[in-house]
Amino acid sequence: MTKLSPLSVPYRVLQRGGSILFAVLFAVASGASAIPFVGVAGPLVFVGLAGVLVLLVVAYEVAYYERYEYELTTDTFDIRSGVFARRNREIPLRRIQNVDIRRNVVQRVIGIAAVDFETAGGSETEAAIRFVSFEEAKRLQAEIARLKRDESRPTEEDTPAAELFALSTKELALVGALSFDFRVPGALFVLASGSVPLLTSLVPDGGGLPVLFGVVLVLFLGVVLFSWAAGAVVAIVNYYGFGLRRVGDELQYERGLLQRYDGSIPVDKVQTLTIEDNPLKRYFGYATLYIETAGYAPGQGDSPGSQAAVPLATRARVERLANDIESFGSPAFDRPPRRVRRRYAARYLIALAAVTGVLFGVDAVLPGSIPWFAAVGLLPFVPVAAHYKWKHRGVWLGPNHVVTRNGVLKRQVKIVPYYRIQTIIDTRTIFQRRWDLATVTADTAGSLSLVQQDAAAVDVDAGEADRLRTALDSRLLTALAERRQTHRRRPSPGAWEPEPDRGAEPASATDEAVTDSDDGSGGSDDEEASGGSSDKEASGGGSDKEASGGGDDEEASGGGDDEEASGGGSDKEASGGGDGADAVEDAESSDADAVEDDSDD
Amino acid sequence: VEVDRVNRLHPRVQVVWIGRALLLAAVIGAVVTAVDRLAFSLPSPVVPGVVAGLALLGVGHAILRYRNWGYEVREDSLYLERGVLTQVRTVVPFVRIQHVDSSRGPVQRLLGLANVVVYTAGSRGADVSVPGLTPDGADDLRERLRRLAIRAESEDAV
């Protein structure tokens, strides 16, 4: 059993003491007269009480430190903690998806770090260690990655870390320059709404409408500039010193100027890749890459909106990198039928008409006149906008992936391996039916999809949609079957099992079957077997790093993932109920197995 | 491998949906009446008109909904089609089924109906529900999907 870093005691004391002090000061400041000890002895009593409080905090933190132990075994990570209520927790290593290390400025100075363990689908962090030394944190991260990989082949030599991407200073400056923080205008608006008199006082009296417009324009420009500056600062603080490495089956990233993040993304848990750009980035030939794993996107909790795996790089580089992770090739998109452009044009015309109507109404109600017909000036842009909207849509069925493309101002190319597809949804609104169109969505178990768009072929021809639906369904099944074949036929190099054994022996074949069966019917009886056999899957995942670059590489790389995906689903439900520990035990019965093993010990 | 043609729901499910629509119309009617009495009086045909219109729309929607609902247990997947204004067709491959529930609410018990809910790990079509089955039919469908889900995996792997 290992303990936390001794330095965590003073740090935690100061942290907790600081918040208590703040609360006390706040209480004193808000209701000083109500405090009993204001007499001559007042200060003495106060100092005495404060002393007792400090002692209590120190005692608690020392006890916390003394009572907190963790241990990394070959297949679980165990934590024993708690001063008053004791808690023993075992997390099976194969369930750990991400190990995130965080250090703020103070922690960096004294050399400690916070470590978070994330499992699939859990909305909350599975285990949070506060705090160990940074070296120990890195050791844990590396060891967990190694143990997950080496469960089935202990003698494998460690692969050297391959640098995939490093953000140059120029690119960092570009990230900053291209970032707008839209939260800033929102906050400003809230603030400003409370001070309307102040704002109106800014408007010179008797100036009339032109002056009002001028003031509004200046305010608007100010807000834009401010949010741009804020966005730049946030982006630079977030992405300073960004680097992405591939270590075995994991991607490791680090970033951050003040708060430093070191995180890992297991490649075989990747559900969807998204390449995103906007007209500016397109013009200069840049793009952003997002990586989505089941139930969790790295950096989620800390800075929403910046889960980018690669914040900015040249398009070619982003595509190469994405191909490194999922070799999908270079998509040749099929655009929707041309009649879709007329539909979009009609849609924009209706929107223009609505805006004009509203402005006309305002004009009629308010005294004075505003140029309500101004929106009509946008008329020539309607066909252009419709054309571009059509032009940037597309879908491509690759050999192993379905790739979709949507959006003009925020164009997203989504890459989904067939074997990641969960359900296929074909929707036709009443308006789409008029044009004989449909939208086909490939739903995955990703997490970003809850807020963002799933990979969807929007406004394809109805007949084409029928074809897509069946094609996606059958390709999913073929891909799954192929993956199982690959797993059996191509055992990982360096596996201790001799090759013929795995291919021929019926026992191992059923073993594999049971493993794979975990990906579908999470709820039912075959769950127990999955605990043991998914180790083999891990080895399947391991094998692809030798074969990396090969065509069917990504098929192997997916080992063990579906099971995670399904785990994600059941986790989501379970974590809604009890606390974290319950979620770990209840959500997956194979986890419960691990817990049972524990109690036998 | 047996392959079904598109199955229809039990016609009695229309009773549930029509009842729900009428209830909604009644609630909105009550609100409009309250506004009429307490706040400002509306022209006399408005309240009955609103209620009748909503009821008519609701009943029409329920009937169309029944007509458009269909499910099919295919060779490798469960296929559903439904929707009045927006028609949705969902393909749920058996390998993706996590678990299957059959459930009966109080109204459904009264009418002798049951639901089957199919869960996947997907973020959006995470639960697909087939309403308007007979209790036996629901249990059969549940069992059948469960077996197919288990078999889909072992069969593929062999």
Image (tube, grey):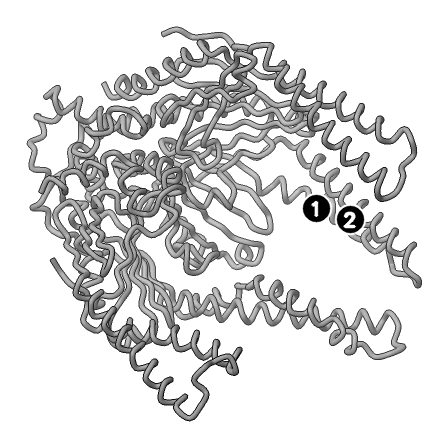
Residue located beneath label 1 in the image = A384
Pinpoint residue A194: horizontal percent, then vertical percent: 69, 69
Q: Is residue A209 above or below residue A572?
A: below
What label does residue A438 carry, if any? Answer: none
Q: Are marks 1 and 2 on the same chain?
A: yes
Q: Are marks 1 and 2 in contact (CB under 8 Å)?
A: yes
Q: Residues within 10 Å of mark 1 (few under 14, many from 20)?
A: few
Q: Is residue B10 above or below residue A234?
A: above
Q: Nearer the viewer, residue A514 or B51?
A: B51
In terms of secondary structure, where does tag 1 sit?
A: helix
Q: Amino acid at mark 2?
A: Pro
In which quadrant will I find the C terminus of chain A?
top left
Relative to residue B56, is residue B89 drawn left or right?
left
Pinpoint residue A83: horizontal percent, then vertical percent: 22, 61
Q: Is residue A208 above or below residue A306?
A: below
- Asked which quadrant contains residue B56, the reply is top right
Residue located beneath label 2 in the image = A380
Tell me which chain the residue with mark 1 is part of. Answer: A
Relative to residue A485, is residue A320 drawn left or right?
right
Seen at 65% across and 33% down, the residue is A338
Seen at 64% across and 69% down, the residue is A191
Tell me which chain the residue with mark 2 is part of. Answer: A
In terms of secondary structure, where does tag 2 sit?
A: loop
Pinpoint residue A271: horizontal percent, then vertical percent: 37, 40
